[in-house]
Amino acid sequence: MIILYILIFIVFIVLFCLARRRGIGIPEYLYEAGRKKGMFGQKGIQENISLLQPDSGGRAEREREYARQFYIGKIKLLLLMLLAGNIFAVCLFLGSNTGDVLQEGKYINRNTYGQGSTKMRLQAEIEEEGGISSCQDFSFTVAEQQYETMLVSQMAGSLAQDLPDLILGNNTSLEEVREDLRLIREAEGYPFRIEWESDDYSSVYSDGKVTNEELGEEGRVVCLTAVFSYGDYKEEHIFPIHIFPPDYSQEEQLSRKVYELLEMREGQNRQEAQVELPETVEGKKIAWSEKKEDSSGMILLLTAIGAITVYFLKDKDLQDRIEARNKQMLLDYPQLVGRITLYLGAGMTVRNVFRKIAFDYQKERRAGGKMHYVYEEMLLACYELDSGVSEAAAYEHFGKRCRLIQYMKFTNLLVQNLKKGSNGILAALRQEAKNAFEERRNMARKLGEEAGTKLLLPMMLMLGIVMVLIIIPAYFSFSV
C-alpha cells in the first residue's frame, strides 16, 4: 500500500510543479486543463449558472467567472480531502509498522519486570513438500520476565467448589472434555492465586492446553491438581477430568502442534530476555513474520469516496440556489403584476411600464437594495428593447428566462395585447393579479406548514424532557 500512497504524493508534486510553472494553483490548473477537453461544460449546470447571473451588464463575462469559481471550488475541496486522507493513511501505515517485536526472524523480546505480558499476532510460513509454503496465523502471548522465586498461579480454599464451572471453557462438563480448559490463574474478588499441575502433561498442560489428537474413542482420565496459595497458606484440590479426542482436520492438527511449540518455548527460561521461536514442525521449516493490522488503505478509500461524494454534492448546492431563485420569483410575481396593472390603468404603455419598474429597481439596487431576479430579467428585457429587439420577442424572451409557468402566462397576455390591441388587457391583468395573490397566500400557508413540520421533532423532544421532569419526581415521591 505504501507504493500507492507515494504515487499519490508524486501526483500532487507533479501537479504543483506544473501549476507553479504557469503561476497558478493546482485547482486552477486542473480546471483549465479539463475545460480544454470539455470536462466542465455540463449543460444543466451552465443553465443554472446563467439563471443566477441575470444582469446583462457584462453578463457573459460574469457567467464565465462564476462557472470558473464554482468548478475550482469543487476541485479544491476534492483535492484537500484526498490529500488529507492520504496523509492520514500514511501516518496510520507507519504507526502500524513501527516498533517491531519480532527480531532476527525468530526472537521476541520479553517485557521487563512489572511491564506485563505482550500480546501479538504471528504469521508462520511453513515449508511443505515440493517447495510450496503455507501461511498460518497465530495469536501469541509472551509473559513478562519473572523472578526465579516468583510463584505463578494462586488461589484459595473457598473457591474450590466453583472451580469446576470456571475452568470448563467451551466444554459441557469435566466428564467430557474435547477442547482446551480455562485454567484460571486468579479469580475476581479473591486475593488468591492458583497453580495447576497435571498427572499427564502429554494430555493436559498446566495452562489448560489439551492435546487429544491421538486419543482413542474411549478417551482418557487425567487428574488436575490445583494448588491454592495466599502468603504461607497452601491447599491442594484434585479434579479428575475425562478427555475425548476432537475432530480436527490435518491443517488444524498442524496448527495446534505449532501452537504447542510456541507455548513450550514461551514457558521455558522465562528469566531470559528473549524467546526463540521454533524453526521446524514435524520436519517442516517455519519462516516467521509479524502480522500487522494495516487499515490505512481503507482510510484512503473512504476518504476518496467522501471527496468524490462532496464534489458531486456541490451540484446539489447549485440546484438549491436555483430553487431559492424560483421561490423568490414566485413571491415577487403578485406584486409585479399588481404594479404593472396599476401603471397600465394610469395610461402608460407596457414598454414604458417595463422601463419604469426595471430602472426604479436599478436605482434601489445601486443604493444597496436586495437583488430580485425577476427585476434583473426585466432590466435585460429593457436592454433588448433598446438594442432593437421587438417588444413581442423581448417579452417572450423574458418569460422563457424566468422558466416559470406564471411568468410565461403573463408574457403571453402581453404579447396578445400587442397583436390584438389593448382591449381587455386591464381586466385580464386584474384577474391575473387576483389569482397571483391567492397563489401567494396558498404558498405562504404551505411554507408555514413546512416550518411546522420541521419544528415537530424538537417539540417532541421537548415534550419528552418535560414528561421525564414530571414523572421522575412523582415516582420518587410515591416510593417514599
Image: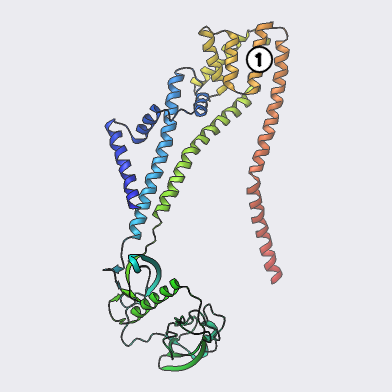
Residue sitting farthest toward the front = 130
- In the image, is residue 371 above or below residue 72? above
Q: Is residue 448 above or below residue 5?
A: above
Find disc 1 in the rendering and name its residue. 412
Can you give x and y, in whole percent of width and height, for residue 298 in the image? 43, 53
Q: Is residue 369 visible?
A: no
Q: Amino acid at mark 1?
A: Asn
2 or 132, nearer to the observer: 132
Give the crowd class for mark 1: few <14, some 14-19, many >=20 residues within 10 Å: some
Residue 329, x across and y down, in percent: 60, 25
Q: Give whichever of 39, 218 is nearer the camera.
A: 218
Residue 163 image position (x, y, % from top left): 52, 86
Q: Quadrant of the C terminus?
A: bottom right
Pick the residue in front: 161 or 214: 214
Q: Position of residue 406 (x, y in %)?
A: 65, 22
> Relative to residue 432, is residue 273 drawn left or right?
left
**In the rendered picture of this protein, how many numbered marks are placed on residues?**
1
**Helix or strand or loop: what does disc 1 sit on?**
helix
Seen in the picture, residue 37 relative to 285 is either above or below; the reply is: above
Q: Horizontally, is 171 left or right of 262 in the view?
A: right
> Which residue is drawn at the image coordinates 72% and 26% (left, top)?
438
Residue 354: quarter of image: top right
Residue at 39% across, 58% down: 294
How did the renderer colour the structure?
A: rainbow
Viewer can see residue 418 = yes
